[in-house]
Amino acid sequence: MKRRDFLTRTGGLLAGGWAGSSVWWPLTQRALAGQSSVTGNKILVMVVLQGGNDGLNTVVPYNDPLYATKRPVLNLPTAQLLDLDMGTTGLHPSLSPLLPLWNQGRVSIIRDVGYPNMNLSHFRATDIMFSASSSQDVISTGWMARWLEALHPGFPDTLPSAPMALQQGFSAGLVLNGNRGTTGVVVDNPSTFYNLVNNNYTGSFSDELPQTPAGDELNFVRTIDEQSFQYAGVIQSAADLGTNLVTYPNTRIANQLATVARLIDGQMGTPVYLTAQSGYDTHGSQLTTHATLLGEMAAGVAAFVSDLDAMGRAEDVLVMTVSEFGRRPSENGSSGTDHGTSAPWFLIGQGIDGGLIGAPPNLASLDPTGNLYIQADYRSVYGTVLQGWMGTAPSVVEDVLFGSFPWLPFLTQTGVPEAPPVSVTHLFAPTPNPGRGQRSIRFQLGRESGVSLRVFDVSGRNVATLKEGYFPAGSHEVRWNPDGLAMGTYLVSLDAAGERRTTKLLVR
Amino acid sequence: MIRRYLLQCTVLAGILPVAFGSISARAVEPDLDSVPDAVDPASAARIAAFEELIDARREVPPLRQPLVRADAGRPMDAGGSGGGGTTMAVGWRAHEGQLTLEEAAHLMNRALVGPRYEEFEWARNRGLQGAVQDLLVSPPTPVAPGAWATEPVPNQTGWTAAMKDSLDTLYRERQKLLRMWWSRTIAQEPASLRETMTLFWHDHFATRMAAVYTPQSMYIQNALLRQHALGNFKTLARAIGTDPAMLVMLDGRLNRKQAPNENFSREMFELFTMGEGSGYTQTDVTEAARACTGWQTDGLVSYLTTSRHDTGVKTIRGQAGNWGMDDFVRILFEQDATAEYFCAKLYRWFVDDEPPPADVTALARTLRENNYEIRPVLLQILNSDHFLDARLHGSIVRDGADLFSGQIRRWHVTGFDPMITTPLTQRNWITNQMNTYGHLLLDPPDVSGWPGHRNWINSNSLPNRKKYSVMIVDGKYTSTQSLGFILDVDAETRRFRDPNNVDLLVEDLALLCFGQKPTELVLEQMASELLQGQLPENWSIDDPDAVSRLRDLYRFVMRLPDYQLK
């Protein structure tokens, strides 16, 4: 099992990332040469609205008389709406935190996003949307995972230096399931993550596992174990380095976005973040529930964007809302709406060419189930993001999305990564640890610097000096056998670039 | 069978010198002629007591024997080279002959939440057929969490805001109590499949307390699931159709002829019976919604309000008539897809995440031929060679309950009662586990239940699973807060075959914790964790520092990736 070897392979950590350069377009060699990240500095933050967001009451076609006819109880009075174009369309009043961004041209609303023959099951529809498949195809990998795997051909034998994707809270799902493994980490609290992982890590295992269902499962758990261990330090370093510069509302979605902003500020180098908000399945009591949810989402996103503004990172981040489907135009008689088809998606950020894309929903021409016909395929949104924002080669985008989909004009320009991100000084925990014999101790430098790598015992005595000297930016490995030391706990200490990083070493 | 098992140990001992170095010097020297065909006296007494308990409540209703295909080949023989191998049909040939201790460990780990070492020995001695039959017996119904569990829901008309607030506070506390009560009930369950199946049904007819709100309704539904846990799928599905909690969860109570609401009828097709993509249409969903109109609830019981019920003709799956809830359920259970969908789910729960379609079809046939009785299908699965296949030992990721309640049960922990509110330590310990593992009982993420299997494990849940599990070894919630109970590592280890033999000790601990024997490297690391540089021949459980060594070992085991599997 090659996967087992990645922790001990010499210097392979970053090389695997560079091997992904063939899928980049139109990056220059210079952009690829110096840094560990393969994604440039563009970041995508997905906000998943779980349960099926009612598009018609989110972006309201108020001058269409059919709107009030189909929604005798649930229609929102025109006077309360936030008018977008002086004539046809208004936002739900709870979305007012987004209005300043709209006025700055940083919000694009794509109308009636969906796919032909939309599925009205939450679960199947979510799977379709996360796998980027057609209504009739069942695909067991996520579109994001396929894209990340294309960028990292060495995964999972070689892990990129920062997590490829980070998901907040407990919601691991199809979108990050790749052909070769899980392409992201789920982190609840980045500040305690390092201790949580390190205090409970038993070391990596080099033994061959049988090719059986049981062997596969153990391999899966071991891989997650090692990935968490591998990334714990990177995530904590970024969380320590990063700071939120604005106050967020205390809601789940805002807390998730605050964490994402902090990690972005901490230069983590992760290109994809996933956040989620549940509760949009409004079969009943829709007016109050929907207003609360949209309000929390809008306030959270608005705080996030002003945080990015304050950090000077607004140009690097794109926010995209996704929901598995919209809701039926006609309300259901229990103050709610049943499952529908297409709905508007929001794209928010400095790189967005703001405005409405598409016509108001056509309420006069509905499908046989009384639902809307789509205007834009959701894979067009993904494709535009991957190619235009992330700078992925068209052929790779086609592979990821199983086809070519028309561009949508929501970006100010095609996003070509400008400068590689600054990576951080980091000291990885030794491997194996605990263990016997030779240890591999790796560290990473964000810039070239004088380095002192030393080992101390618990009383602070310097028991070994492993490296002293000047090292270039990048990843370095030192091999060392501590077996001559007395049993116990030691601290490995790295001084570099004006910073100190330490990690525990257990000697048996 | 013990003889056979020891033979395996000999083989193991033969391999060990390489991996274990000096440890193997003390590996078993089996003298086959002198090995008794019975277990040691203490163990035999435990088993006898256990069997008495089983006998006292053995009242299995007569069932038709499950169909077993006579022509079924030996499980997975043909698939040996293909890696994985579970995609081809393997058949359900009944297992003949005795059980090894490892097979018994596998059976009990899949059948129970937190099985104990002496239960492995019991199952091995009882034999597969007998053990499974006993496991299918329902134990006495657990006592309700309090008289409040069935107390009428007050009509709040004319109440002041303060009165409403105080009821709200009370109900929210009871919601927590109910959740703790269930975690305790699971931990206290005798050796029976009932609580395992109650968890299965909760996952199947997934209902969220966050949506239902009224704790009484959630208790009543939980009791209903337990009552039918080993009963009849069709009967239970009909009862769920008018279950008070479900009427709230999926808006059935709002569904009336003047304004049909299809939330329940859709999930009934999609998640509870036929399964998504099995041929029903949007028209079936809307027509069935009309059949379900008019049902309302006071929180404890449900009733049909005729003025809200649609008495017109509805056409469901091609059958036209003035259908109501009974007819809707009847029609659903006339569809072959229902048994197929259900049996695939049952297979994933008990056997493996990747059910071979032909084997599911065989189970579905059994289910239909027995009019949707559950026991014959469980018998067919658990009694088979396929179920016992060693390649599937450890192929299922443990759910959260397996850890937070299972550990309590497995280790005979006394002093566990998370319903106690002073202090709140135990409740916090359990609740934090439910939250960080993503297995908050009575609040599944949505109506499809928990996605389960690999979805249980991610970079956040995995280290939390280790962190909270390990607390039980030291009996501490924080460095200063006691949990109020502790894992007695000495007593637990003394249950094993020979607690002074390091090889056997780590192997038995592995069987107990992983439901299978792990790789040699894992066994070696376990031994080295126990010995900490000492020679195996110097290990004695009677040493003064043995308990501290054992604690290190138990902590280590709970942090191993293997601990997450069963």
Image (cartoon, coloured by chain):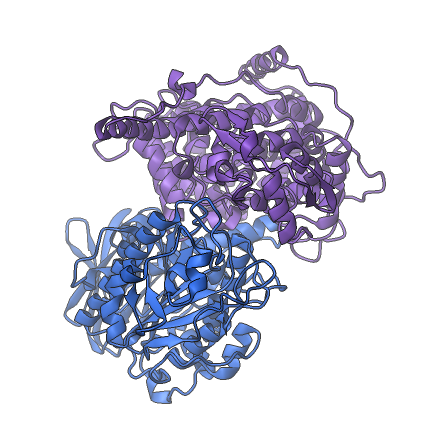
In the image, residue A64 sits, relative to residue B497, either above or below, namely below
At 51% across and 50% down in the image, what residue appears? Answer: B454
- Whether residue B287 sits left or right of residue A1 in the image: it is right
Percent position of residue A164, x then y: 39, 67
Percent position of residue B291, x then y: 62, 39
Percent position of residue A162, x then y: 34, 67
- Closer to the camera, A236 or A135? A135
- Whether residue A209 sits left or right of residue A161 in the image: it is right
Q: Residue furthest right?
A: B71
Chain corresponding to blue in the figure = A
- Closer to the camera, B32 or A319? A319
Residue B214 visible to an observer of this rendering: yes
Q: Quadrant of the N terminus of chain B?
A: top right
Percent position of residue B349, x then y: 59, 40
- Closer to the camera, A129 or A500? A129
At 32% across and 74% down in the image, what residue appears? Answer: A85
Residue B497 visible to an observer of this rendering: no
Would you identify the image quadrant in which residue A370 lies? bottom right
- Whether residue A234 sits left or right of residue B434 in the image: it is left
- Closer to the camera, A17 or B557? A17
Q: Quadrant of the C terminus of chain B?
A: top right
- Whether residue B172 sits left or right of residue A333 in the image: it is left
At 60% across and 42% down in the image, what residue appears? Answer: B290
In the image, residue B328 sits, relative to residue B125, either above or below, namely below
Q: How many marks?
A: 0
Q: Colour of chain B?
A: purple
